[in-house]
Amino acid sequence: MKKFWLLGMVGALVLISGCSDKYTPSTNATPESIFKEACVKCHSPVNGKVMALSPEMANTAAIIERIKNGKGFGMPAFPNLTGGTAEGLAQYILDNSATK
Ligand code: HEC
């Protein structure tokens, strides 16, 4: 039985860490290059718009919050995108998104 308990613990750890993306931008990264490296695999632009934001998401504070904390099982948290980097990225998304 001890083995099953251990397997369960390992499984739980994988689940928890699966919700977070350890991507770290290089020092000369731009919001655009960060988006291409870390986000495009899930958020592919449509008609040049990187995202279709719902009205409550269409501000930098909400976008920064989403980058920091992620959402559910689909959107990972990015603990290494912080401060000015997160702000620049949020502004880039806002400027290049459609609103629903
Ligand atoms: C592994 C796939 C994946 C990656 C990588 C990813 N996202 Fe997401 N993202 C999602 C999913 C799925 C949702 C929708 C989550 C929901 O609403 O339940 C989402 C939602 C969002 C939203 C909210 C949009 C809205 O209108 O509700 C923002 C903002 C966002 N992502 C920004 C980013 C940024 C910035 C990056 C890169 C740093 C990124 N995402 C990387 C999967 C991903």
Image (cartoon, rainbow, N blue to C red):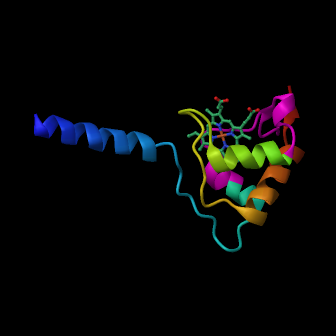
Which residue shows up at 84% across the image and 32% down it? 56
- Range of residues picked out in magenta: 35-59
Closer to us: 32 or 94: 94
Classify residue 57 as left or right of residue 3: right
- Quarter containing the C terminus: top right
- Quarter containing the N terminus: top left
Closer to us: 1 or 59: 1
Classify residue 77 as left or right of residue 65: left
The percent coordinates of residue 53 (x first, y second) are 81, 33
Q: Is residue 81 above or below residue 17?
A: below
Name the residue at the top extreme.
100
Which residue shows up at 63% across the image and 55% down it? 37
Q: Quadrant of ligand 1?
A: top right
Which residue shows up at 89% across the image and 46% down it? 95
The percent coordinates of residue 26 (x first, y second) are 63, 70
Residue 83 found in image quarter? bottom right
Residue 11 found in image quarter? top left
Q: How many marks?
A: 0
Q: Is residue 86 above or below residue 67?
A: below
Q: Is residue 16 magenta?
A: no
